[in-house]
Image: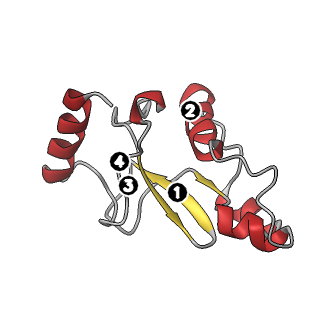
Amino acid sequence: MSIELIRDIKISILEGKYKCISAYKIPNDIEKWKNCSLCGLKPLTWTFNNGASTACGCGESEYRHFSINTESIMSHVSRNNGSALHYNSNKLLENWNHWVETNEELETHQSLIENGYW
């Protein structure tokens, strides 16, 4: 990880540029994540029991913000009889970078809920 990149992100967090709660963290592979095409920030991520989400500077507040989403490993394991086989641990990164390039969400929050992945 680039020390300068991490420093810049932490400064942006302190300046209040990110619209998210403190549960969102800098991804370990942050250099692979593209900058948001709207606000210019690299995303922070949060993985929890049934999902994983991104946050950047787009939105109204820490509770009302734009996110790209995907299924978490726990949700995948629960749906697959305890197996993590075929889980794509890079899916959130792929979904984010695709959205930055195309403005298309591969997995909307609603579609994840409807398909039982959230």
Packing grade of label 3 (10 A; few <14, some 14-19, many >=20) is some
* Residue type at tag 4: Ile
Q: Which residue is mark 2?
A: 97
Whether residues under marks 1 and 4 lie with C-beta atoms below 8 angstroms apart, the answer is: no
Q: Which residue is mark 3?
A: 59
* Residue type at tag 2: Asn
* Residue at point 56%, 59% (across, down): 52
Residue 64 locus on image (x, y percent): 41, 65
Q: Which residue is mark 1?
A: 53
Residue 109 placement, left or right of 15: right
Packing grade of label 4 (10 A; few <14, some 14-19, many >=20) is some
Whether residues under marks 2 and 4 lie with C-beta atoms below 8 angstroms apart, the answer is: no
* Residue at point 34%, 61% (across, down): 20
- How far apart, in angstroms, are the residues tagged by discs 2 and 4? 15 Å
* Marks 2 and 3, the one that precedes in the sequence: 3
- How far apart, in angstroms, are the residues tagged by discs 3 and 1? 14 Å
* Marks 3 and 1, the one that precedes in the sequence: 1
* Residue at point 36%, 66% (across, down): 23
